[in-house]
Image: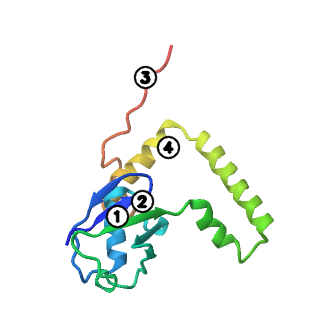
Amino acid sequence: MQPTMKALQGSECSLQEAEDELVSTLKHLVTDKLNVPVCQQCLLFKGKALADEKGLSDYNIGPNSKLNLVVKPWEKLISKGLAPHFSIGDASRVLEQLQRDYDRSLCRLILDDIECLARRFLHPEVTEAMEKGFLEGEALGPAKTEPPVN
């Protein structure tokens, strides 16, 4: 079966999936194809939100079905986590402070930090092996440094 996924931002892709697969499995495919984290996805079919633990066949999703993807903003996900512990006003202030701290920490990154982060994202298996002590030093080669500016 090959349902089509349409994001509300306009991107669209076809996914190869068995009819008896779970919605949660489909969400992982969406992450791979459209680069949207599973926790931010809300899949809709004929206007109805799909439950992760149900199968595609439970919703009569066929080979030429069109599913819609709604991407939940991070702020709503974070504020849901803050809601049990803070009032709405306090949660909003905490969220604003988190954003300021995040922005400030990004401004303080140096080139070596950015290269290290890039290596971790691009080659997570090598980073994990290095952390466990299976590989020594710079398994991906030394970090490239910028020539001095005169």
Residue 75 in view: yes
Q: Say what secondary structure mark 3 lies in.
A: loop
| Closer-to-camera residue (110/58) | 58
Kindly report which numbered mark, 4 or 2, lies closer to the viewer in this rendering. Answer: 2
Q: Is residue 3 left or right of residue 124?
A: left
Residue 129 in view: no
Q: Could you tell me which residue is drawn at 61 percent across and 39 percent down?
A: 107
Mark 3 or 1 closer to N-term?
1
Kindly report which numbered mark, 2 or 3, lies closer to the viewer in this rendering. Answer: 2
Packing grade of label 4 (10 A; few <14, some 14-19, many >=20) is few
User: Quick check: marks 2 and 3 in contact, CB under 8 Å?
Assistant: no
| Closer-to-camera residue (20/120) | 20
What residue is disc 1 on?
30
Q: Say what secondary structure mark 2 lies in.
A: loop
Residue 40 locus on image (x, y percent): 49, 65
Looking at the rendered structure, the kind of residue marked 1 is Val
The Cα–Cα distance between marks 4 and 2, rounded to whole angstroms, is 24 Å
Q: Is residue 82 above or below residue 109?
A: below
Q: Is residue 106 left or right of residue 63?
A: right
Mark 4 or 2 closer to N-term?
2
Packing grade of label 1 (10 A; few <14, some 14-19, many >=20) is many
